[in-house]
Image (cartoon, helix red, strand yellow):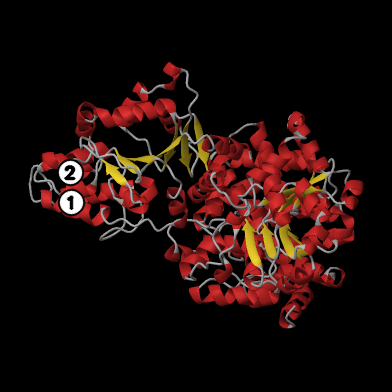
């Protein structure tokens, strides 16, 4: 919110000048292809240089180390690539450029007096019907058309070149140096703007831009005392020392990290509102323009790759079970509230509701909009309208105002459909909460069937109804099939990866890792539990301020909300942190663990358990083998050993914490059974089970006995059944466990289930025991175990 307020203030000064880099038009259609990204253009130049017939040229290894400027010098200025080939290439990739992206077009529709650009393509001037201003070329002023200052030249102009000297494009180092001498008029104008205007760098890498650096030196705002801003708009925050130093060198005052499309729309709305003579709500009129369904748009929507708030998902979404109820309420109620977890589909539901209700004017306010008093009053004045307002677009006091204004809305024949998080339901009061429509974060059977109709033909696995929407999206994002449809990974996966890469080894990060681990198993963390754990980490001073910010950092995977009345009373907690997706949080934990290493991961888990068991009666869930194995389960074979090392070390470290607990020894033995093939470790695990059998109640003893039997069965197999004594112990222990099956049939049948299909150890033990004279004394036990197998368990 602070960033939006700051940016809004800058834009409203009407003193902003866009400085547009190659990233703006990259990918847009041209005469014969699309505008290349920087790396693509380097590859094109490199390929043509290597293909040139002359022998006097750099070799493949040498040219592979060339920078962009060095490559450009060789391509444009050396007699290597024929001039006609260069001109044909420029014509193909940089002329007749059509900017079709709606967000970019909206941004360019802003009445900027002029634009600066590093691009040599003609996309900008074609989009705005502008006059291009080129280096070293005189131009005539125009009263009505806007100017595009092309600092690096123009492809169309280069096509008229008769020799290399006439190629007036500025890419190489020699070009830059020459430009500083001959292009001083244009650079002086740029220096003046750097000194007096707010500069918006958009789509610029700012890598070795000598002419810009020259203008910055000449237009240093510190000399004049001017308080102008140099904003660097990027979709990825600068993380390396080199990147940060570069931005400092170019005098960047602020870095705006956001989706470019959102920025374009935001800028257009802020500046457009200055001259908008109509109602402030009119710009939110819903046009119902659909995005054409394709495999690409379906996947972009599901995995949120390049998907924007303004993109209409109607044609790539499915009908939800609650839509009928919403439609009925829209027909009779002035205020309809829909609530649900993040990624439950609230935004999609709003779009679908607007498409399904066409008899009144429709307005849509996305979550990127910040509703102020003026806009809210305009909404309340609307007549014959449906207004859909997405989550986080309105503040608490505006929700209260909507509730108080229900009669006024009804008189105007206007309905407001608002989506909120659970934490915002309190704004409507207890009486209204029951009227709100809850949207489940899981699909019902009919919904899962509908999404399968869209995804199954592409080869994806069927939708799992027991899993949440986010968990299913994780499965899709991890599928190789997605790579065949979309290039690159989902923005959700990218967000997790970037958070994990930035992980630091300090107390705060260890606490955050512990919180993620706790949530991956316990699903929710109450503020009381969090405060106790933070205190043990020596971070009690942030206990009351950190949790909400941490939840925002990990949105939509986590959600921070006020605890309900029962939880406030029983848990003595006012707030609760919710895990919205096991799959994504487990993925994050695996990434962080690999980043910090086995030792740090195991220590954090043990420390977390030590803290949680003081306050959480179910803390033992944190160290159950099945839970640890679920988090660290790997589909990649080469990572299995890494997983085994983490789990093994966790149990070793736990020995000093809860060695007196028989259940600990049972879990440790179970872990060895599943992850180890070492004879000595298996024999040690058998003894661990003995502690669980001796020191515990009847039910736990049965469970420990069966784990012991399985360990002995595995031991027999890896030693090739050579030991009669091992076989005797295995058969006797299996028989003892099965004799108690009626006391805990679910657990015993579950552990032995795979044995019925010949994949376990019990059948191999029985087969190996046949004909062994040393085992005749336990023939009765052997017959008993074989009868269990024959009867299908």
Name the residue carrying label 1: 48
Circle 1 residues within 10 Å: few <14, some 14–19, many ≥20 = some
Task: Tell how many labels.
Answer: 2
Specify the quadrant of the image occupied by residue 475. bottom right
Q: Which one is in front, 60 or 2? A: 2
Residue 460, can we see it? yes
Specify the quadrant of the image occupied by residue 31. bottom left
**In which quadrant is the C terminus drawn?**
bottom right
Residue 124 location (% of width, % of height): 35, 49
Q: Which one is in front, 382 or 110? A: 382
Residue 534 higher or lower than 481, as above or below: above
Tell me whether circle 2 and circle 1 mark residues in contact (CB < 8 Å). Answer: yes
Residue 613 higher or lower than 193, as above or below: below
Q: Which one is in front, 59 or 608? A: 59
Residue 716, can we see it? no
Residue 158 location (% of width, % of height): 18, 46
Relative to 36, is 677 on the left or the right? right
Q: What residue appears at the point 81 percent right and 51 percent down from the top-left corner?
A: 427
Q: Secondary structure at mark 1?
A: helix
Residue 34 location (% of width, % of height): 31, 57
Name the residue carrying label 2: 75
Q: What residue appears at the point 43 percent right and 22 percent down from the top-left corner?
A: 221
Relative to 576, is 47 on the left or the right? left
Residue furthest bottom as drawn: 791
Specify the quadrant of the image occupied by residue 274. top right
Distance from Cα at disc 2 to Cα at disc 1: 8 Å
Residue furthest right as drawn: 569
Residue 707 location (% of width, % of height): 74, 61
Q: Identify the mark nearer the N-term, 2 or 1.
A: 1
**In which quadrant is the N terminus drawn?**
top right
Q: Secondary structure at mark 2?
A: helix
């Amino acid at each position: 919110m602070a960033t939006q307020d700051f940016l809004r203030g800058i834009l409203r000064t009407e003193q902003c000048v866009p400085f547009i880099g190659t990233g703006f038009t990259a990918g847009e259609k041209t005469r014969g292809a699309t505008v290349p990204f920087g790396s693509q253009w380097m590859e094109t130049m490199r390929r043509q240089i290597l293909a040139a017939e002359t022998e006097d040229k750099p070799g493949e290894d040498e040219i592979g180390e060339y920078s962009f400027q060095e490559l450009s010098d060789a391509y444009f200025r050396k007699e290597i690539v024929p001039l006609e080939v260069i001109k044909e290439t420029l014509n193909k990739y940089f002329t007749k450029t059509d900017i079709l992206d709606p967000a970019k077009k909206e941004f360019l529709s802003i009445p900027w007096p002029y634009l600066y650009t590093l691009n040599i393509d003609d996309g900008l001037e074609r989009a705005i019907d502008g006059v291009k201003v080129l280096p070293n070329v005189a131009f005539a002023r125009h009263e009505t058309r806007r100017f595009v200052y092309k600092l690096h030249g123009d492809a169309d102009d280069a096509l008229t070149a008769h020799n290399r000297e006439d190629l007036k494009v500025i890419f190489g180092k020699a070009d830059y140096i020459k430009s500083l001498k001959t292009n001083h008029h244009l650079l002086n104008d740029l220096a003046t703007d750097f000194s007096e205007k707010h500069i918006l760098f958009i789509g610029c890498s700012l890598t070795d831009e000598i002419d810009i650096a020259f203008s910055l030196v000449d237009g240093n705002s510190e000399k004049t005392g001017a308080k102008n801003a140099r904003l660097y708009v990027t979709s990825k925050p600068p993380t390396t020392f080199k990147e940060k130093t570069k931005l400092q060198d170019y005098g960047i005052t602020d870095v705006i990290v956001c989706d470019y499309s959102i920025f374009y729309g935001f800028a257009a709305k802020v500046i457009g509102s200055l001259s908008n003579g109509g109602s402030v709500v009119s710009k939110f009129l819903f046009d119902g323009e659909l995005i054409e369904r394709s495999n690409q748009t379906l996947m972009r929507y599901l995995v949120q790759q390049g998907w924007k708030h303004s993109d209409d998902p109607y044609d790539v979404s499915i009908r939800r079970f609650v839509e009928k109820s919403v439609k009925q309420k829209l027909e009779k109620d002035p205020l309809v509230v829909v609530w649900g977890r993040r990624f439950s589909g609230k935004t999609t539901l709003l779009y679908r509701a607007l498409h399904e209700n066409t008899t009144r004017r429709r307005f849509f306010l996305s979550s990127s909009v910040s509703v102020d008093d003026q806009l809210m009053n305009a909404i309340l004045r609307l007549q014959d309208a449906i207004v859909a307002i997405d989550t986080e677009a309105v503040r608490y006091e505006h929700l209260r105002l909507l509730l108080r204004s229900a009669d006024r809305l009804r008189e105007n024949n206007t309905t407001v459909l608002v989506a909120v998080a659970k934490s915002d339901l309190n704004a409507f009061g207890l009486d209204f909460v029951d009227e709100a429509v809850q949207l489940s974060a899981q699909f019902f059977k009919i919904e899962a069937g509908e999404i399968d109709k869209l995804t199954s033909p592409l080869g994806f696995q069927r939708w799992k109804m027991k899993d949440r929407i986010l968990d299913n999206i994780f499965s899709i994002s991890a599928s190789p099939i997605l790579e065949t449809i979309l290039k690159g990974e989902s923005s959700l996966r990218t967000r997790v990866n970037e958070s994990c890469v930035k992980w630091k080894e300090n107390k705060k990060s260890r606490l955050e890792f512990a919180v993620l681990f706790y949530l991956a198993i316990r699903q929710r963390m109450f503020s009381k539990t969090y405060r106790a754990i933070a205190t043990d980490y020596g971070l009690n001073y942030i206990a009351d301020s950190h949790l909400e910010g941490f939840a925002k950092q990990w949105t939509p995977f986590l959600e921070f909300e006020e605890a309900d009345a029962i939880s406030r009373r029983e848990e003595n907690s006012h707030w609760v942190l919710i895990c919205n997706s096991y799959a994504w949080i487990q993925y994050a934990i695996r990434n962080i663990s690999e980043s910090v290493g086995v030792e740090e991961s195991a220590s954090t888990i043990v420390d977390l358990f030590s803290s949680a068991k003081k306050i959480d009666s179910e803390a033992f869930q944190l160290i159950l083998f099945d839970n640890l194995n679920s988090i660290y389960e790997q589909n990649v074979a080469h990572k299995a050993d890494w997983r085994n090392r983490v789990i093994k070390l966790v149990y070793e470290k736990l020995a000093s914490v809860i060695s007196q607990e028989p259940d600990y020894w049972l879990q440790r033995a179970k872990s060895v059974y599943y992850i180890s093939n070492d004879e000595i470790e298996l024999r040690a695990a058998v003894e661990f089970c003995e502690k669980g059998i001796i020191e515990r109640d009847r039910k736990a003893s049965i469970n420990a006995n069966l784990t012991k039997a399985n360990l002995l069965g595995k031991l027999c197999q890896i030693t090739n059944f050579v030991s009669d004594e091992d076989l005797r112990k295995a058969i006797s222990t299996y028989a003892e466990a099965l004799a108690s099956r009626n006391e805990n049939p679910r657990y015993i049948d579950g552990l032995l289930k795979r044995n019925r299909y010949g994949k376990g150890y019990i059948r191999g033990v029985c087969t190996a025991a046949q004909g062994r004279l040393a085992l005749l004394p336990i023939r009765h036990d052997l017959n008993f175990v074989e009868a269990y197998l024959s009867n299908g368990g």
